């Protein structure tokens, strides 16, 4: 019965589930999400035989949370044939997971935070970059992520895999982008644009509230968004290199902010 259930997911059904964000790929993401969303998981497919400690850990977490396990290597291969790297484990959902919030829902919560860090992605094109930056946000204690209305790929299978599932854990605010930035400015945020023409990041200080805006991989930030920024920072580097990958730039900027905020706290 279990084998038949898996085989009934033909290529068209697989593609439909992937398109509708009903597939979770990657061992780390699945391990992270099952305890929180176990009722949304239909079943998890793993190879027929495996000695991988990480896959065995996924199996154990499935058992603990009463999520059905299907051992079907053929199904894994079908996923791989769609040019999708499953890393040997695929989870299927019975309904979507992941919530988005309005700026109104989170703006009042900011007053209760000693510090607040927001990262905004107005028009990042590549899902791998988006996933990598969300994972960086998780590691750098970002409080929430801001995306514009119409940005739907935040919960895609690729973003989920690369971010290790943190796209479902860090609060996501989806809003009219410029309106949301205005609300943050009203709350005395440093709205910081990562821009090659900005001030040397080593010379920039921050207050307790900051929103970092990451531009498009090729075009950077639009003039409209740059006009909303009350700070613009650049990362100095060897002139041989034209620019850094957006995820690398964000990681450096967030590390720099965290270091400077901790130094300020230490002096108080």
Image (tube, helix red, strand yellow):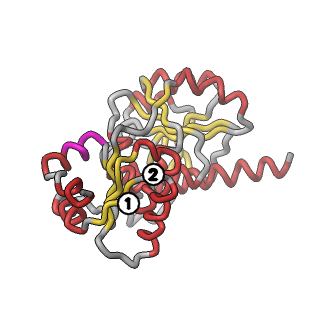
How far from the left and from the top, in percent, is residue 255? Answer: 60, 55
Are discs 2 and 1 less than 8 Å apart at CB? yes
Q: Nearer the viewer, residue 56 or 233?
A: 56
> Over which residues does the magenta segment extend?
16-21
Within the magenta stretch, is there residue 17? yes
Separation of residues labelled 2 and 1 (CA atoms): 9 Å
- Up-down: is 224 above or below 72? above
Which quarter of the picture shows residue 225? top left
Q: Nearer the viewer, residue 55 or 48?
A: 48
How far from the left and from the top, in percent, is residue 171? Answer: 53, 38
Residue 165, labelled with which disc? 2
> Could you tell me which secondary element the residue under label 2 belongs to?
loop
Q: Residue at x 47, y 59 (%)?
A: 63
- Up-down: is 24 above or below 55? above
Q: Quadrant of the N terminus?
A: bottom left
**Disc with the residue nearer the chain's start (2 vs 1):** 1
Left or right: residue 11 versus residue 246 is left
């Amino acid at each position: 019965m279990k084998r038949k259930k898996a085989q009934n997911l033909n290529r068209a059904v697989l593609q439909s589930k992937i398109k509708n964000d009903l597939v979770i790929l990657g061992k780390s993401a699945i391990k992270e999400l099952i305890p929180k969303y176990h009722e949304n998981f239909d079943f998890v497919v793993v190879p027929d035989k495996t000695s991988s400690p990480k896959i065995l850990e996924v199996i154990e977490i499935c058992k603990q949370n009463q999520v059905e396990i299907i051992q079907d290597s053929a199904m894994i291969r079908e996923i791989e044939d769609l040019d999708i790297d499953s890393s040997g484990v695929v989870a299927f959902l019975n309904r979507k997971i992941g919530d988005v919030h309005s700026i109104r829902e989170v703006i009042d919560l900011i007053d209760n935070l000693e510090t607040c860090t927001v990262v905004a992605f107005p028009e990042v094109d590549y899902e791998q970059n988006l996933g990598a930056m969300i994972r960086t946000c998780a590691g750098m204690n970002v409080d929430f992520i801001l995306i514009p209305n119409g940005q739907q790929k935040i919960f895609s299978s690729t973003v989920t895999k690369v971010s290790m599932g943190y796209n479902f854990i860090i609060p996501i605010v989806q809003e009219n982008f410029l309106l949301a930035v205005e609300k943050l400015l009203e709350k005395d945020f440093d709205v910081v644009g990562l821009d090659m023409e900005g001030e040397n990041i080593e010379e920039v200080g921050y207050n307790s509230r900051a929103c970092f805006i990451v531009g498009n991989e090729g075009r950077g930030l639009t003039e409209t968004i740059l006009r909303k920024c009350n700070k613009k920072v650049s990362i100095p580097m060897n002139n041989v290199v034209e620019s850094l990958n957006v995820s690398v730039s964000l990681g450096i900027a967030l590390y720099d902010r965290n270091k400077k905020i901790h130094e300020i706290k230490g002096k108080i």
